[in-house]
Image (cartoon, grey):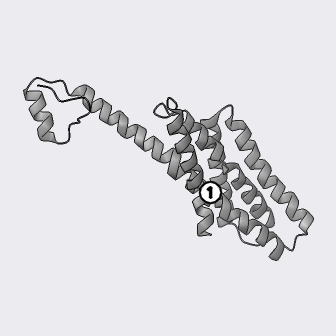
Amino acid sequence: MSKPAAQSLTTAGDVVADVEQGHDTTNNNADNALTFVDKAKMFLCVFSLPYFYGTITTLPFIYFVIHMRNEFKLSWIDVGCFVGCYQAAGVTTNFLTIFIPRTTHFVGTSLGLIGSIAVLVKSNDDKLAFLLGTIAVGFSESFSSAQLLLKNLSCVNKDMELMSRKLKIQYASGEIKRSRL
């Protein structure tokens, strides 16, 4: 006698009992593995990516303006130009996401990592390294990449109501970092 489709194997004893009775458990185990993979992808796209993107891009951006004004004594016009460069880096990433989301996400995050390392390794007095490094962090503005990755998940893209809910949760996950600042 086989188990209903909604019921899953929960213990090794169940697997052994089913095998002894001649039931095929390979499909059930594959379904469980696929479900786990889908859940892992969902967690990454809905919670992890938006939260860490927000934290990694918001903190340097806040520090960027303060450091340019207080340490480098730049004029507000210069500050505005460099902030514009930071924002342009993010817009570039978001635009390219339309065409190549995974590549853009990887390249943008890598450039952001390189920029963060440059800022952390260099002296606080090194204006060029600070400005270029922080502008490079702007390329890691990858929220649109995370949205496209979520929309392309096979477990989500077939159910518009589920996708709508997950996109709202994803947005909220990205905004959590603002409440902690």
Position in image of residue 119 (x %, y %): 69, 64
Residue lying at 71% horizontally and 71% vertically, measured from the top left? 123
Position in image of residue 126 (x %, y %): 77, 68
- Quarter of the view holding residue 36: top left
Taking depth in this image into account, of 150 and 68 the one nearest to the observer is: 150
**In the visual, does 97 lie left or right of 68?**
left
**In the visual, does 141 lie left or right of 44?**
right
- Work out whether 34 lies above or below 56: above
Residue lying at 57% horizontally and 47% vertically, measured from the top left? 168
**In the visual, does 73 lie left or right of 2?**
right
Farthest bottom residue in view: 70
> What kind of residue is marked 1?
Gly
- Quarter of the view holding residue 131: bottom right
Taking depth in this image into account, of 12 and 114 the one nearest to the observer is: 12
Residue at mark 1: 54
**In the visual, does 1 lie left or right of 92?**
left
- Work out whether 78 lies above or below 8: below
Residue lying at 20% horizontally and 28% vertically, measured from the top left? 25
- Quarter of the view holding residue 118: bottom right
Position in image of residue 138 (x %, y %): 72, 53
Q: Secondary structure at mark 1?
A: helix
Farthest front residue in view: 161
**Disc 1 crowd, CA 10 A, few/some/many (<14, 14-19, 20+):** many
Position in image of residue 91 (x %, y %): 76, 45
Quadrant where the C terminus sits is bottom right
Residue lying at 15% horizontally and 26% vertically, measured from the top left? 2
